[in-house]
Image (cartoon, rainbow, N blue to C red):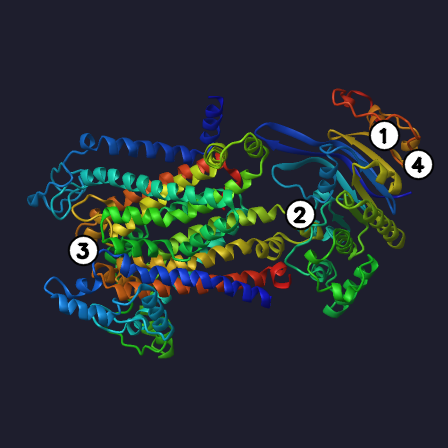
Amino acid sequence: MENLLEFIKQYKKNRAAVVGFIVVVLLLLTAIFAPIVAPYSPNIQNLADRLIPPMWDAKGVSSHILGTDDFGRDLFSRIIFGSRISLMVGAISVGVSLSFGLIMGIVAAYFGGKTDLFIMRIVDIMLSIPAILLAIVIVSILGPSLFSAMTAIGIVGIPTYARIVRSSVLAEREKEYVIASRINGSSNFRLMFVVILPNCASPIIVQATMGFASAVLEAAGLSFLGLGAQPPTPEWGAMLSDSLQFITTAPWMIFYPGLAIFLTVLSFNLMGDGLMDVLDPKLKDK
Amino acid sequence: MFSYIVKRLLWTIPTLFGVTLLVFSMVHLTPGDPAAAILGDKANKQSIADLRAQMGLDKPLYEQYFIYIKNLSHGDFGKSANSNEEVMSEFKDRFPATVELSMVAMFFAVFLGIGAGIISAVKRYSIFDYGSMFGALAGVSMPVFWLGLVLIYFFSVKLGWLPVSGRLGYEFDIDHITGFYLIDSLLAKDYEAFWDALKHLILPAIALGTIPMAIIARMTRSSMIEVMKEEYIKTARAKGCSRFQVIFIHALRNAMMPVVTIIGLMLGSLFAGAILTETTFSWPGIGKWLVNAVYQRDFPVIQSTTLIIAIIFIIVNFIVDLLYAFINPKIRLG
Amino acid sequence: MKNLLEVKNLKTFFYSDAGVNKAVNDVSFEIPKGKTVCIVGESGSGKSITSLSILRLIDHPGVIEGGEVILDGKDLLKLSDAQMRKIRGREISMIFQEPMTSLNPSYTVGYQIDEALRLHQKHLNKKQRFEKVVESLDLVGIPDPREKYREYPFKLSGGQRQRVMIAIAMACEPKLLIADEPTTALDVTIQAQVLDLMKELQDKKGTSILFITHDLGVVYQIADEVVVMYKGHIVEKASAQELFKDPRHPYTKALLHSIPIPGVTPRKSKLDTVDDDVDYLSFPKEIR
């Protein structure tokens, strides 16, 4: 409890990180209560109300806060529902990266020797292909869909987590408490996951927060390319790619979905930055 | 130094092996028969079997891999499944466009990034520092394709200062000597074309360079701050060096070492980032080509572009490591 | 006897959220020409800050709040930054504790000595400077100075690096050399060599030395005058002879009793510790 209070006190020093945290919480609430918050259903088309500008630009009265798209769908509602997709993509991708990266990193560091060499070679090879390219390769194998995009981003993230976990386990492995536990007869599994792992939590938490941000960004990118979420899914990146041709006539279709991506990613990054200050100051800017 | 180069060169072999293996197995990991996929629904069994034999798919896997590598080593990257053109010839047409864009973007990112990083480090805790570090965080959070669209909207649609898309206006026609329009137009002494090519480059280069710029700025700042705490900085000041000399002679050179590494790492991801930028700006490079190939499931094109980008990435990293060794006397002489 | 440098009522404070740390609080002492003055004290006593304040190398959040540092009649604290740069390295130079990190790893040894000449002796040409650098490397006892000119610091041992530091500091033949614990990080045998070198250079060039150390054994070997600092204040000031023979301030006595000094501490005498619970500042200052 005291630790938690101290943690909050330290975290609060970074104002930007507090703002990031608040936005993330708001985003989470928005996603949960999307049907209540959104004034319209995200996918209902109304061709009579096509390409209406945002409220403040609309001449005459309009009930569409951010205007409508080329199918007459309410942009604000689509963005609200889009938060569900982005948060889900972030959570699942980070989940995939984290679970595989964790196991690979901890096994490599704990067993060392040839196991370590083999695992880290795979990691190096994966890192020798730029992330978005590898993601595109995976998507082209699985075929374009939101599921493929999440899987691809998850796989692409594995090496980063594996490296971070490995280096922190390596640092912990030789410490007295581990040796003591080993002398007391702990099994390998217990040593790895119960004794060592909790002490490596800080850099992993920081990486997961930042990783969430980049997963959201990458998923939006893939969807923008048409390789992720498919229409009519209200995914922010996909919404942007639909709106390309309307850049002169309906620029609001471009501004707001992109702004949603930017603010979401920025908030998670700010939060990660704040967590890094508190949990792992040495990691800062590395 | 020589043994270091050899050692570093040997390290790339397993990586190359892994990358070719991955690219090779792409076709086989895909659900369904590639031959059937090419011929479509109406194909009969006999024609599928013929195509399989023609593509070498009936041979054992290791043999197929061996043949694949053999062809690659002859520069034979296969034919596009859709256009039936040699992959390599189209690649040669498009590659300079991507390289030109990436280079200009990197140039922009390196200069502004290092500059902002140095000023932030030197004027630590100033408004400039807070501003540029927040800007750097915003930069890495920026969806580049969106930034590209917003730039197009303001500078092309609203202000009409810069072109919306493409590499060069239709009214210009220049010889493709190097494939880099900036250089080709200068060689042809066609300064109007040069200016036009430059105008086409500005927005995509800014969009593509934003993330690397942000990363470089952050890295430069933290590296400079670390170095400025070193004892040898105190020595230089005690010697009577001016602030300028301390920063640019004593600090910068040491602070640049991690920055050089990160710049190298980013060169590769810049090619990848170009995929998004090229789509936004209809830039006729390999990124856009790759995306189209994925839509059409044109595997020879996907395989070749992936492989070539990965190889370039490996080569660039190799060069960066050499450069790093060169500026670090401990590796150069050790 | 004339004084080269006079420090009068120097105050250097550090400001932070937690409050003000008065690292150097009203410190005054003199450095006579050609003599060695030692400032002794524990870590945190303000001895290093005092020496850095003389060269005005105090960084944010530290501020020199007051006092005078008079060199040849001019107050260094009143000079412009540009004027101060002409003092550093030419009139006063400084060497530091960590020879492993106080040389720039990216430049050759020769370059780093040459730089001092380039800054302060602009009338010399490249060739003359090269000869001077080689000469100074020779002077500080580096073998094969012509070869070593091109060497990078990581190739040299700790003792050799400290010799190079001394060569940089002595390149322009300054009037005062400030040495901030220059031997602390070195092996005992190397320590003695470096101290001998400094004394030898002092005899040859007539340089005054301000020596900062916590090691009374070193003080005994080289000091003419001794300044004892404790928590930012000077508690005792005396000639080396007087101080070791007849320490007056309780803190000095405690310090002297806490470590054996060859030639001073009687054999088999009991060692004591400096008592953290005693407020030594409550005793009157002993300035002789």
| Label 2 crowd bin: few (<14), some (14–19), many (20+), radius 10 Å | some
Q: Nearer the viewer, mark 3 or mark 1?
A: 1
* Of residues B161 and C207, the one drawn nearer to the viewer in this rendering: C207
* Of residues C122 and A43, the one drawn nearer to the viewer in this rendering: A43
Amino acid type shown at disc 3: Gln
Amino acid type shown at disc 2: Glu
| Label 4 crowd bin: few (<14), some (14–19), many (20+), radius 10 Å | few
| Label 1 crowd bin: few (<14), some (14–19), many (20+), radius 10 Å | many
Give the image location of residue A136, x and y in percent: 30, 55
Amino acid type shown at disc 4: Gly
Residues under numbered marks 4 and 1 in contact, where contact means CB atoms less than 8 Å apart: no
What residue sits 82% from the left and 61% below the top?
A: C138
- Gap between marks 2 and 4, in whole Å? 35 Å
Give the image location of residue C208, x and y in percent: 84, 47
Q: In the picture provided, is A2 more to the left or to the right than B139? A: right
- Tell me, yes or no, whether dots 3 and 2 are on the same chain: no
Where does label 3 land, which residue? Answer: A245
- Gap between marks 2 and 1, in whole Å? 31 Å
| Label 3 crowd bin: few (<14), some (14–19), many (20+), radius 10 Å | few
Indicate whether C14 appears above or below B128. Answer: above
Image mark for residue B231: 2
